[in-house]
Image (cartoon, grey):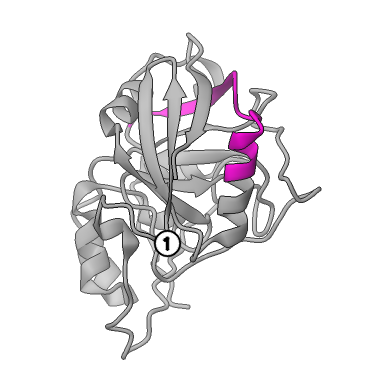
């Protein structure tokens, strides 16, 4: 695997080094070898394909529609769908919100230290060469490799550092992927967090949640609540 070194701003790196929720250092999943030109990147289109799922997260600040990628992350999508259908996320807050970075939820305890998977314990990462932490990506929060439970985050960052595209190319990122980061993202989390979905409608809601005033541990001063997650497809 080729590593993308130094690919976050100083602020992003500091934010990403928090325990439990985010990766502790930079990394990349730019492990596409020459000859992989035929790889399909499902995040390139908002259209929901036949092999994809669709959910809507109904929050106290609006609704976010997200398509999921079961082919690339089958266990992660199954975990999220089952929790959603069982009402596991109902009433759960976005407990960590950082404008210019991401919004994080999925912990019934609301502390960032709780939550569990449907598998009876932490489950393995499903890192795909087709999926990246671009703006709008739905990814799993973790406490290190293969520690996935129920917590997730949506990438909200609108703009990456101007020096990153060239560094990404040097690290082996395909041109199509580099271009996907034109709208923002967190490439320093690639290869460290399982991407399993992409927002197709409601990024304005994500931005609104990200802009909410926060207090200690980046927790919103007024709870932003997941009222329900509906599985539409």
Name the residue at 45% across, 16% down. 214
Residue 65's x, y, as percent? 36, 36
Q: From this view, report whether residue 167 is shown above or below residue 39.
A: above
* Between 91 and 53, the one nearer to me in the picture: 53
Residue 195's x, y, as percent? 47, 55
* Between 230 and 61, the one nearer to me in the picture: 230
Q: From this view, report whether residue 72 is shown above or below residue 89.
A: below
Q: Secondary structure at mark 1?
A: loop
In this picture, residue 63 sits left or right of residue 163: right
Residue with the mark numbered 1: 51
Residue at the farthest right position: 120
Residue 139's x, y, as percent? 49, 48
Give the quadrant of residue 95.
top right
- Quadrant (top left/top right/bottom left/bottom right) for the C terminus: top left
Name the residue at 31% across, 90% down. 35
Q: From this view, report whether residue 20 is shown above or below residue 75.
A: above
Highlighted magenta segment, given as a residue range? 81-99
Q: How many neighbours does mark 1 have within 10 angstroms: few (below 14), some (14-19), or many (20 or more)?
A: few
Q: From this view, report whether residue 73 is shown above or below residue 102.
A: below
Residue 19's x, y, as percent? 62, 41
Name the residue at 64% across, 38% down. 83
Residue at the farthest bottom position: 35
* Between 109 and 46, the one nearer to me in the picture: 46
In this picture, residue 117 sits left or right of residue 63: right
The reply to whether the magenta stretch includes residue 44 is no
Q: How many marks?
A: 1
């Amino acid at each position: 695997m080729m590593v993308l070194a130094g690919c976050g701003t100083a602020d992003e790196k500091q934010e990403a080094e928090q325990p439990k929720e985010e990766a502790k250092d930079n990394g990349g999943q730019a492990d596409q070898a020459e000859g992989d030109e035929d790889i399909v990147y499902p995040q390139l289109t908002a259209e929901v394909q036949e092999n994809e799922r669709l959910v809507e997260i109904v929050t106290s600040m609006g609704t976010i529609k997200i398509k999921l990628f079961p082919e690339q992350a089958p266990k992660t999508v199954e975990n999220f769908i089952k929790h959603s259908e069982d009402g596991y996320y109902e009433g759960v807050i976005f407990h960590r919100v950082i404008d210019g970075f991401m919004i994080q939820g999925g912990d019934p305890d609301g502390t960032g230290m709780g939550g569990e998977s449907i598998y009876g314990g932490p489950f393995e990462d499903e890192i795909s060469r087709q999926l990246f932490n671009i703006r709008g990506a739905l990814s799993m929060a973790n406490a290190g490799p293969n520690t996935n439970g129920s917590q997730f985050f949506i990438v909200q960052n609108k703009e990456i550092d101007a020096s990153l595209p060239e560094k990404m190319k040097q690290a082996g990122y395909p041109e199509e992927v580099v271009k996907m980061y034109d709208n923002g993202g967190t490439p320093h989390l690639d290869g460290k967090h399982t991407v399993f979905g992409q927002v197709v409608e409601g990024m304005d809601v994500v931005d609104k949640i990200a802009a909410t005033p926060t207090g200690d541990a980046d927790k919103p001063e007024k709870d932003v609540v997941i009222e329900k997650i509906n599985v539409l497809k």
